[in-house]
Structures are given as C-alpha cells and as structure tokens.
Image (spheres, helix red, strand yellow):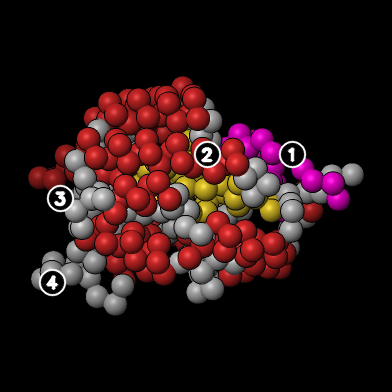
Amino acid sequence: MLAAMKIDAFCHIIPAPYLDRIEALSVTEHSRGIRQRSTAVPAMVDLDVRFRQLEEFGDDYRQVISIPAPPAEDLGPPAVSRQLARIGNEALADLVRRHPERFAGFVACMPMNDVDGTLEEIDYACGELGALGIQIYTHVNGHALDNARFEPIWSRMAELSKTIWVHPSRSSAWADYPTEERSKYELWWVFGWEYDTAIFMGRMVMSGVLERHPEIKFLIHHGGSMVPHFAGRIGPGLDQLGARTPPDQRADIETYPLSKRPFEYFKQFYVDTALFGTAHAIRCSLEFFGVEHVLFASDSPFDPERGPGYIRATIANLESLELSDAERAAIYEDNARRVLGVEVERVPA
C-alpha cells in the first residue's frame, strides 16, 4: 500500500548560484532585500537546515520550489534579468534532480521586463529543464499585465497547458496615501500585496485574458487574496459596472467582450492555502473557488520559526475543517498532480 502525499505547491528557496550572481550586482533596494531574506531565514539557502526541518512532516511531504521576491526584472535591465532567470532556473532544476525525496518540482523564474526573453525562457525552462510552469508577479516594474505586449506570454502558457504561479509584489515605496512618500508599518505587505493580487485578477478578467484563453491556469497565492471575501462586490457589484463612472470617464470601463458575468471568470482561478494558519480564511477560499481549485501550500519558510511553522499550521487548519477524505486528498495531492502536472512516486505506507 502507498501513502497519500502532501504536495506543498508554493514554497520558496534561493539557490546558491542565484544568490552569488545577485551579490555580484550593484546593491539596490531590491537586492538588499533578498540579501536580508537569505541571512534572516537560513532554510532559504541552507539545505541541511531545510531538510532537518522537513523531517517533521514525514517522507510523504514534498515541496514545489520557486525563487522568492523580488522579481528578476526588479534586479536589473533585461540583459541582467534574463541572465538571472537562466541561472535561477538551471539551479532550481538541479535541486529537484538531486533531491526528489523533498522537491516535487520547480516553478521557473522569468525576465518579465523582456517579453521575447520570457518566451525564450518559457520554452527552455518548461521544455528542457522540466519546470512545472512559471512564476510571475502582479505587475512588471509598475506596469499592468493586461497590457497587450504581454499577450504572447498568455498564449504560450495556454498552448503549453502549463500553470502560471502569481506572486504579489510591492514595497514601502508604494505609499498608503497620495500625500505621503512611503508606506508605514509594513502595511504595504500586510494589505498592499493582497490588494495588488486582487487587482491583477480583476484586470485579467475584465481585459479578456481568461475569455481569450479559457484553458489558461493561474495559481493565485494566499487563497485568492481579497476575492473570495468580497464575492458580493465582484458579483452583483460588477454586474452594475458603469453605475459609479461619470460619462467623461467611460473609457475606463470598456471591457473586452465577455461571454459570461465577471463573477464566473473569477472562479476559474486556482488558489493555494498559504494563509498563515487561519482556517476560516481557507474555508472562505474553498467555499468560493471549490475544492477542485484549491491546492495545499504553506509559503514556507516565511513563518516566525523560519521554516516549519506555516507548514504545520496549514496542515492543522485543513485537518480541522469539515472535509471528506477525498476532499482532503484533492487539496493535498490530487489537484497538484492534475493542475500542475506533478509526477512523484508515493512512498510505501
């Protein structure tokens, strides 16, 4: 008999070659941040530390790994971001190849400030290195992703039937109020990241990306952010699109011709359970998106314990919810195999 698995679909790691290349760059606000993460969270870079932590969760636990924020495009111009993406992806692929007992696959880093470079990296990472999909962020150097220049990326990913992991991205430079210069109290992270994620989802819906590519697969971090909690606003609220917009601003509400209510497109997103130990939030995501669209993920190693805390808490959350064995199996494992294409062997029970 083979044991069921827990496939953690959104975990972060900084491969040594990627960090080495960043350390060779001129110091910027963004590169300083990733250096701080690497030193503050040993499990991000030290595999011995990471593997000791993961022993708690048994042989049936696996991680899907990706490089943490900031995006490669925040670390330099296209030539630099393309090089970083290539170094990062080859290093991630090597980690998966060398440690299949812990890593179920990897998500490719992209140089999104260079669309041609991104298309090339998609083909290389997904086609040659075996990436499960790609990771993007909620904007590219402040530019919205519903801009027409990004359309070839959506087309390519839909054609390949590979998943797009979506991670929020914002810094304290995004002020809380127009009269201020910087965000305070790290609220740019607490609330700003989730706002950005919800806006990304809305722009993908209203601009017609999901209409044009009905098979495209977006995996949204943190349970779909604000969306499941504000279903009434995106349902009956968006059904009244235009009611709040004066005539001279009508261009702001011109959508791509949609064949369904906006509400229905939001349900096409896949989301994870990385909600930092809050069972009621996971329940809300499940009620909105449905079990078949929710994947187990912890966001490890960004918990106060710097590794195992959110894994343990998320498992406890899922065990506390009123779910059938089949529903838990779908969230823990089956959805990752079906949606992400994870192929790992189960271990003997």
- Residue extending farthest to the top is 159
Residue type for callout 1 = Glu
Of marks 3 and 1, the one in the foreground: 1
Of marks 1 and 4, the one in the foreground: 1
Looking at the rendered structure, the secondary structure element under dot 4 is: loop
- Distance Cα–Cα, label 1 vs label 2: 19 Å
Of marks 1 and 2, the one in the foreground: 2
Residue type for callout 3 = Pro
Looking at the rendered structure, the secondary structure element under dot 3 is: loop
Q: Residue at x 13, y 69 (%)?
A: 181
- Distance Cα–Cα, label 3 vs label 1: 58 Å
Q: Nearer the viewer, residue 26 or 198?
A: 26
Of marks 3 and 2, the one in the foreground: 2
First in sequence: mark 1 or mark 4? Answer: 4
Q: Which mark is residue 94?
A: 2
First in sequence: mark 3 or mark 4? Answer: 4
Examine the structure image and report whether residue 330 is included in the region drawn in magenta.
Answer: yes
Q: Quadrant of residue 292?
A: top right
First in sequence: mark 1 or mark 2? Answer: 2
**Whole-percent x, y for residue 184 in the image:** 24, 75
Horizontal side, residue 62 vs residue 34: left or right: right
Residue type for callout 4 = Glu
Of marks 3 and 4, the one in the foreground: 4
Looking at the rendered structure, the secondary structure element under dot 1 is: loop
Q: Which residue is mark 1?
A: 345
Q: Residue at x 89, y 44 (%)?
A: 1
Assess disc 2: are there few (<14), some (14-19) or many (≥20) residues with their C-alpha within 10 Å of its C-alpha: some
Q: Which residues are magenta?
A: 328-349
Q: Which residue is mark 4?
A: 180
Q: Nearer the viewer, residue 293 or 309?
A: 309
Tell me if label 1 and label 4 are in contact, CB under 8 Å. Answer: no
Q: Which mark is residue 246?
A: 3
